[in-house]
Image (tube, helix red, strand yellow):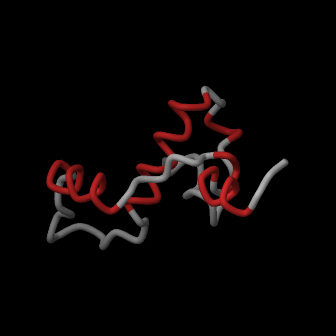
Amino acid sequence: MWTPGDRALVGDFGSGQALTDEQFRLLEPLIPPAKPEGRPRTTDLRNLLDGLFYLVRTGCQWRHLPPPPAFPPWRTV
């Protein structure tokens, strides 16, 4: 039987492995900065990484990635 605690661990769409603050802090320096002359970023990079890790973890196809607001559009991820 699912309890609220179980659902908190699993998260939306069964992803359950969203990056923690500490994990994102470790990865953040590896993300290249936006180019000053380019268009400003509109995608949340943490959410994008969560989408990538979801794909790797579940083995789902790109087009079957859960739609926004769970993750960015599959073309962006």
Of residues 17 and 49, the one nearer the viewer is 17
61 lies above or below 69: above
Give the image quarter of residue 59: top right
Estimate the x, y position of residue 61 in percent, counting from the top left.
65, 30
Image position, residue 33 (x, y; %): 17, 61
Residue 44 in the figure: left or right of residue 58: left
Q: Which of 14 and 3 is in front in this view?
A: 3
Q: Which quadrant holds residue 57?
A: top right
Note whether 73 is above or below 44 in the view shown.
above
Q: Residue at x 60, y 46 (%)?
A: 15
Residue 30 at what x, y percent from top left?
Answer: 17, 48
- Relative to 40, is 22 above or below? above
Q: Is residue 45 left or right of residue 26?
A: right
Q: Residue at x 68, y 50 (%)?
A: 66
In the visual, does 69 lie left or right of 38? right
Q: How many labels does the image show?
A: 0
* Picture residue at 54% right of the left edge, 41% below the top: 54
Q: Residue furthest right?
A: 1
| Most foreground residue, 13 or 10 | 10
- Residue 67 falls in image quadrant: bottom right
Q: Position of residue 27 (x, y in %)?
A: 23, 50
